Image (cartoon, coloured by chain):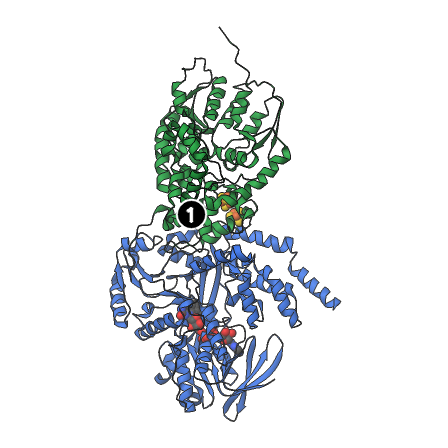
Amino acid sequence: MINKCEKIPDEARMPPRFADACVRCANCMAVCPVSRVTPTFPGPKQAGPGAQRFRLPSEASVDDWITLCTGCKLCDTVCPSGVPISRMNLLAKAKYLREQGRKPRDWVLARSDLYGESASRLATVVNPLMKNTVIRKILDSVLEIDARRELPSYERQTFHRWFRARPVAAGGFTQGRVAYFHGCFVDTNETDVGKAVVALLESQGLEVALPPQNCCGLPRLGIGDFRGAREMGARNIASLLPVVRDGVDVVFSSTSCGMMLRHDYSQILGLAGAEELAEHLFDVSEYLLSLYDDKKITPAFLPVKVKAAYFAPCHLRAMNIGLPALELLGLVPGLDVQSVDADCCGLGGLYGFKKENCAVAEAIGGDLAKAVARIKPDIVITDCEGCRMQIRHLTGLKVVHPVQLLRDSLKPLPVTG
Amino acid sequence: MDYKTEVVIIGGGATGAGIARDLALRGIPSILVERGDFTSGASGRNQGLLHSGARYAVYDPEAARECVAENRILRHIAPHCIEPTGGLFVSLPEDGFEFRGEFIRACENAGIETVSLSPREALALEPGINPLLIGAVQVPDGAIDPFTLVVENIRDAESRGAVVFTHTEATGFLRDGDGVAGVVVRDLLEKKEFTISASWVINAAGAWANRILALAGLSIPMSLSKGSMLITNTRLSQRVLNRCRPPASGDIIVPNSTVSILGTTSLRVDAVESFEVLPEEAAFLVYELSLLVPEIKSERFIRAYAGVRPLIRSGETDDDRSLSRGFSLIDHQKENGISGLVTIAGGKLITCRLMAEKTVDFLCEKMGLRAPCTTAEQRLPGAGIGRSLQDRLLHMRREIPAARQEILCDCELVPRDEVEAVLKEGKVRELRDILHRTRIAKGTCQGGFCVYRLLGMLNELRRERNRGDSNEILMDFLEERWRGIRPILWGTALKEEELIESIYKGLFNLSGELSGGQEAGERGRR
Ligand SMILES: Cc1cc2nc3c(=O)[nH]c(=O)nc-3n(C[C@H](O)[C@H](O)[C@H](O)COP(=O)(O)OP(=O)(O)OC[C@H]3O[C@@H](n4cnc5c(N)ncnc54)[C@H](O)[C@@H]3O)c2cc1C
Ligand code: SF4
Ligand code: SF4
């Protein structure tokens, strides 16, 4: 009669207090992009604190719809009672996926950091393959990676190789040193964003350091692989903590990596040292803006004649730091930039690449696409690589990171000596 | 219209319902009258423990053996009303091991399976237990859903020819010389009186038994004890948790569906309707049970409620009347020279089937009928219907995408069609009847957010009968709800209450005076 004393993995433990805090006001239901577009997902209140009362640690999960939560965290931002809804969903998802067994596809997508570097080396081979319809059909049917979605192409030289290979910057760094956490995507798929960050920071008298770093672990966490995510996190903390203890701040350009480092490492993964690190981690625009506000830097930009739409990614909003990039962009003379009135791009990182989620991602994105179209911009600007991919996919427009536009409109430095 | 039948049953609690079913299965016609709804009495106000018998093993071995047998039977006939959770008797340092040894021996004698656990093993099963525990004993306790159990007994009885009247009170007896020849009853909603003549009247009015007997100038020695309980928002443990010490107040936590029930207190009372939970009782339960599960101190509660136990003083009655120390079957012919009247009282929810069996056996003997009892073999009509938490979550998953079903009660996931099915049955006459037949209003908000969604449906129902005033029903419900939540209003519960209050007062403009005013206005218009 007595049950086996089975060891319960930590993702299966959920403090009951999580559900207790909900006052059932339904604020969260008004912002969830997923429940807005699909009836299959019952919405944050029901999926989080609501369903939690029905989940017994001893019983197998039956709520397969939990995998539909993109983890955008918009619900968390409006909850008046501090219910960690997206975290509950993540824990429930982890339990569900652990019981069901994750698909090989999930492992492949979540470990892009393991093959990113090699893919970059073989970019000339890999990129055409990724566009090959036959290969995509195979990926679609075998791995369930949706064929309708373009896969990002790999750069031939990774960002960190470029950084190491470039000529050592001349001195004159009046503002001290800052370390940069670039994340995987910048490293292997969008190196120009990293190059822009370096150029922008250096132009303001900041010396840029590139401490050793790994994937932030968010893709692993997204498929409920807590152990894998924790491993990544521990490695990054081990490398970054000495840097900040030396008095050097760390900036990131990817809001999702940033959210993971700054919030999830401590709040979800409970990693040692995470809180200390978080105090010295900044979004790159947030960092520059605060230097500007403190009158430490006075960036000068050339006038541009561009009409731009700026979209604030969910994870940026969840960070609760305002819209620093939009403020910085306001310093560029002639730039007509308008904020896009939409809540979420719908990609949800790897979420939108999964065949079963593609329709949901497209539907959420549909509203964003319409909002962008209303602005009729020449270009779209957003801080998150996922959003950039999605907006490119949806609108066909050119989409850049704020730092790219800022760098491009920098006044060339006066040549001295 | 007046009625005539073989047996009249007064009281539609677990006992009365069990008797109606047993009679129906043996082919004896009966009519049951219930003043409120089926679970208005103790049957809807208890802790929902499916006793393994362990709680009685040491001090009442006979009751323990009864529980062992009935527990097994209920698992067979009513699996959908039962959660076979298992239970632990936990020894804390202050309890010592003295009682534990005696307890294990007594369980063995009563045929109750026990497994002794080390503190480590117990904590692995139930991480919430006080880590200072010195040991635990596992027993086959469980949880039982009294609402479903009673309603299902009634459904089965009705499908086999029994007739039931709810909201109908027995107000007097029809007399035939020295005997009783039926009852005078009053439909409390229609405000109409009628009679039911019968060869036998069974008084199954629980704690109200003496009120019924008073109508015939009789009484039995009975005292009343109030027990208060608290309900948590989430389930605290997977298993029933008891203190391993002589049974006392505040020593048991029973998981039940989405919640856990902390119990109980024990206070002598004079009035049967003593349902108010005092602040000191709530404080006592929280304190006492936080010794067992420390988290309870910061737990969110959603309701407090109380039930009244009729305690029959068997010492003053002859031994042969007392079929067991658990319950009493009283033949008033033998006792008081009044024929045709039988009282069945005491016992437990889980022995109600047995009580019914003994009562109907007795009647059959008197009638000279040879009809064997089959209630222990025949399963209840809903047996096999999935009602576990998993099933309900799964139901939501199935229902949501397809039909865009409206979920009436978010907290307990009750879809509209479930309520419609209950309404279609045609048995409910009041809002509370719906609440007894579904899990509506049994969750976090205690109906604060969902009951107004029901009013439209209810208004239809009442309009058919020419009595529609949703405001009045809503006020009644809110008053009762308020009594239930007032003792536990602190922390998040208090925050949520402010929100709910602002919905009713601010959005619905509902206040005491106003509803009176509206009522007057409506009457004026009519
Ligand atoms: C606090 C508490 C905790 C308990 N915990 C448990 C437990 O965990 N497990 C367990 O097995 N048992 C438990 N019990 C015992 C169990 O609840 C009762 O034994 C059982 O419900 C009794 O059912 P009943 O039908 O005899 O009485 P009741 O359910 O009280 O039914 C009597 C019915 O008679 C009706 N009535 C009264 N007067 C009239 C009238 N004039 N005309 C028509 N109808 C009338 C009432 O409305 C009522 O519905 C507990 C009891 C209490 C009080
Ligand atoms: S994290 Fe985003 S998708 Fe998930 S429930 Fe919250 S709002 Fe909805
Ligand atoms: S916003 Fe927060 S408190 Fe309100 S319903 Fe959602 S989880 Fe509950």
**Subunit of mark 1?**
A
- Residue B183: x, y in percent? 54, 85
Q: Quadrant of residue A105?
A: top left
- Furthest toward the top, the residue is A417
Amino acid type at mark 1: Lys
Q: Which residue is mark 1?
A: A93
For mark 1, give the secondary structure: helix
Q: Residue at x 54, y 46 (%)?
A: A28
Which quarter of the image is occupied by the C terminus of chain B?
A: bottom right
Q: Residue at the right extreme?
A: B525
- Quadrant of the snapshot with the N terminus of chain B: bottom right
Visible in this render: residue A404?
yes
Residue at image location 44% in from the left, 75% down from the top: B223
Front position in the image: A147 or B504: A147
When asked about the image quadrant of residue B35, the answer is bottom right
Specify the farthest residue to the bottom: B177
Q: Quadrant of residue B235?
A: bottom left
Against B163, residue A284 (above or below) is above
For chain B, the rendered hue is blue
